[in-house]
Amino acid sequence: MHDLDLLFATAKAQDAAAGPSDGLMARVLADAAREQPHPAARPAARPDTAPLLSNPQAGFWPALAAVFGGGGVVAGLGTAAVAGLYLGFAPPAAMVQLTAAVIGTTSLESVDLMPGVDALLSEELEDER
């Protein structure tokens, strides 16, 4: 315990205001400045879609895609529409149960939204026998 008191007394006797040297601070700041992210280059300006819309030679589909923001946007909208149609015509069993519970034809306690894997495991075990 005496050694610890001696260590604290020595630390207290040293000048507490003396911080790191100027050379150390300059090296730390130079390293920090080197690691800072550099601003990214500005992206090229998007071409104006007005000439495409006013050009009758471009065709209907390119003009329609330009109205919505490009081919990628139209592809995303088409994918979402197809997924919505599929889920509307062939909903998963859990959605049918949930819909019945929301409408009120069945109680919400009978809906199993997070089914366990017990049924899957029992089928696999029977297949292995």
Image (cartoon, helix red, strand yellow):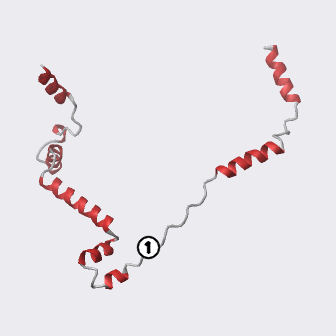
Q: Nearer the viewer, residue 91 or 48?
A: 48
Q: Residue at 28% x, 75% y: name it.
A: 62
Residue 58 horizontal side relative to residue 119, left or right: right
The image quarter containing residue 18 is top right
* Image height of 77 relative to 93, above or below: below
Residue 10 position in % (x across, y down): 86, 25
Q: Residues within 10 Å of mark 1 (few under 14, many from 20)?
A: few
Q: Measured from the top left, where is residue 27 in percent x and y?
A: 76, 45
Instruction: State which quarter of the image contains the C terminus.
Output: top left
Circle 1 residue: 46
Residue 56 versus residue 74: which sits nearer the camera?
Answer: 56
* Extreme residue toward the top, this view: 1
Q: Residue at x 29, y 61 (%)?
A: 76
Q: Amino acid at mark 1?
A: Arg
User: Relative to 68, does residue 108 appear above or below in the rendering?
Assistant: above
Q: Quadrant of the N terminus?
A: top right
**Could you say which quadrant of the image residue 16 lies in?**
top right
For numbered disc 1, what is the local secondary structure? loop
